[in-house]
């Protein structure tokens, strides 16, 4: 029953999120996958935003305000859906892809069985879990929590989206249940596979999309760190990948609203983990370059797009600055610190290279990425392909370089614990890039299926 209640509470959040981006959905684009995934993402961000902002004003009533806000927006969305269903609204492609639920449903069941037999992991229990319990028991975010020296073990500077979702579930359960909140991570994992399939479906046949989605799902380290753990890397992956898909789509179609959606998703990624800031800065930079290339007023238009980003991030980042809450893992970057720790760079480079050749963790993912990047280098002349390639390479490079400023002693412990999870965050983007560089596979697969079908007919 606890699992069902947690799932229904997520449905409520998804309905609220689905009501928010109406202007991003032209009437011709009614995809069940997009509604579900974007609803979950935007609804999660909405809940985290409302809970934090309301807690700044009335801490003990923050969760109550959040519940009222989410329920009210969800009710509006339900009314809109009823009206649409009575008219010409339909979810395109739902019946035609229903059969896909069988293999992926079976895989999710297997993951769920494993997930519910394990704990949330250290970060899940401490970094996110203790925050979630505090918000649930207090009724919102206790502002003194973030400056209490005794709570430093929970990394008070870490963002609040994941603990918000856990506290949200506890509120509906009326108790703390660390097993039931695994549903949140299973839902995010399912959403990642769904939006990955949907993004590829715009380019390729169903069968090839299923194959690539299975390759993503079965990537060894992703499978082990997905729904099984309570780490925030999976939610960040979903925000980052969805943002990249819509940002790329906006670049190709020259659609300001789709570009804006990509930026908002990037900004919400900062509410998941601090690493999301790197992806956001990259997307803002890509937008500025794109506008310059199109000979538009780059600075002015970029600033216009940046307004909603600032509105999304201002409460949390402003709070950290006002309360002077330091970064718990890194010292303030400076040229002096860089030169002092420059001898770390070879160690960092070796660690990163070790990830690329760790077949037990990534399979052939990175071998394929570098091989295809070299063999199909001319494809990178296309802006959409270059955007994806740089969206993989630049964040990984930035993540790695950041260890020069690690406050851990020795810093190698920080490196060993974090490098694989940092590489994990771009895994869906890497598979997506690989798929887009090999369009001929779709034709070969189609011909192979036709040959097999013809042979069976003759027999």
Image (cartoon, grey):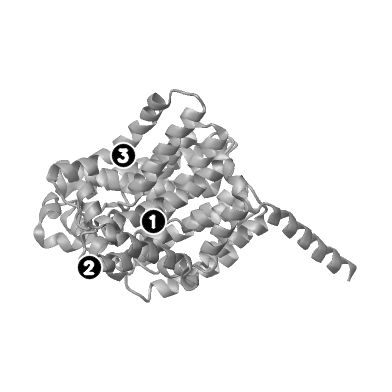
Q: Residue at x 74, y 54 (%)?
A: 443
* Residue 234 falls left or right of residue 198: left
Residue 183 shows in this picture: no
Q: Which residue is mark 2?
A: 410
- Up the image or down, 98 lies above or below 270; here it is below
Give above or below for 73 relative to 108.
above
Residue assigned mark 3? 312
Side (left or right) of 355 relative to 91: left
Read off the residue under disc 1.
235
- Around disc 2, counting alpha carbons within 10 Å, would you say few (fewer than 14), some (14 to 19), or many (20 or more)? few
**Horizontal and vertical percent for residue 161?**
30, 52
| Neighbours of disc 1 within 10 Å: few (<14), some (14-19), many (20+) | many
Q: Is residue 74 above or below residue 1?
A: above
Q: Position of residue 275 (x, y in %)?
A: 33, 52
Where is residue 267 drawn, in percent x and y? 35, 43
Q: Secondary structure at mark 3?
A: helix
Residue 407: name its quadrant.
bottom left
Q: Earlier in the sequence, mark 1 or mark 3?
A: 1
Q: Is residue 350 in view from this perspective?
A: yes
């Amino acid at each position: 029953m606890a699992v069902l209640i947690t799932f229904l509470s997520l449905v409520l959040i998804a309905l609220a999120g689905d009501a928010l981006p109406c202007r991003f959905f032209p009437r011709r684009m009614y995809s069940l996958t997009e509604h579900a995934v974007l609803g979950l993402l935007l609804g999660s961000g909405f809940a985290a935003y409302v809970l934090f902002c309301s807690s700044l004003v009335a801490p003990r009533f923050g969760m109550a305000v959040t519940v009222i806000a989410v329920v009210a927006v969800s009710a509006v969305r339900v009314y809109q859906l009823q009206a649409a269903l009575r008219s010409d609204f339909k979810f395109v492609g739902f019946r035609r892809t229903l059969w896909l639920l069988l293999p992926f449903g079976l895989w999710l069941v297997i993951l769920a069985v494993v997930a519910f037999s394990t704990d949330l992991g250290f970060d899940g229990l401490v970094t996110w879990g203790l925050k979630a319990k505090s918000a649930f028991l207090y009724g919102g975010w206790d502002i003194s929590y973030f400056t209490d020296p005794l709570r430093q073990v929970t990394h008070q500077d870490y963002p609040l989206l994941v603990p918000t979702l856990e506290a949200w579930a506890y509120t509906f359960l009326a108790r703390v249940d660390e097993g039931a909140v695994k549903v949140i991570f299973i839902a995010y994992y399912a959403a990642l596979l769904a939006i990955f399939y949907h993004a590829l479906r715009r380019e390729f046949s169903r069968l090839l999309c299923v194959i690539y989605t299975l390759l993503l799902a079965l990537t060894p380290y992703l499978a082990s760190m997905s729904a099984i753990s309570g780490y925030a890397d999976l939610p960040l992956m979903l925000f980052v990948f969805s943002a990249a898909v819509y940002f790329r789509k906006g670049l190709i179609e020259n659609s300001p609203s789709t570009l804006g959606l990509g930026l908002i998703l990037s900004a919400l990624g900062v509410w998941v983990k601090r690493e999301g800031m790197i992806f956001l800065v990259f997307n803002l930079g890509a937008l500025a370059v794109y506008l310059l290339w199109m000979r538009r007023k780059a600075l002015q238009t970029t600033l216009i797009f940046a307004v909603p980003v600032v509105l999304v991030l201002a409460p949390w980042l402003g709070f950290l600055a006002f309360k002077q809450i330091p970064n718990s893992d890194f010292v303030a970057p400076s040229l002096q610190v860089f030169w002092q720790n420059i001898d770390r760079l070879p160690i960092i480079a070796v660690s990163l290279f070790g990830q690329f050749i760790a077949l037990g963790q990534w399979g052939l993912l990175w071998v394929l990425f570098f091989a295809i990047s070299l063999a199909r280098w001319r494809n990178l002349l296309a802006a959409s392909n270059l955007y994806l390639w740089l969206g993989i390479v630049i964040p990984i490079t930035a993540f790695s370089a950041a260890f020069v400023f690690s406050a851990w002693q020795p810093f190698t412990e920080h490196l060993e614990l974090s490098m694989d999870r940092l590489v994990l965050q771009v895994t869906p983007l890497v598979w997506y890039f690989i798929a887009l560089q090999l369009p001929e596979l779709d034709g070969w697969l189609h011909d192979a299926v036709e040959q097999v079908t013809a042979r069976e007919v003759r027999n």
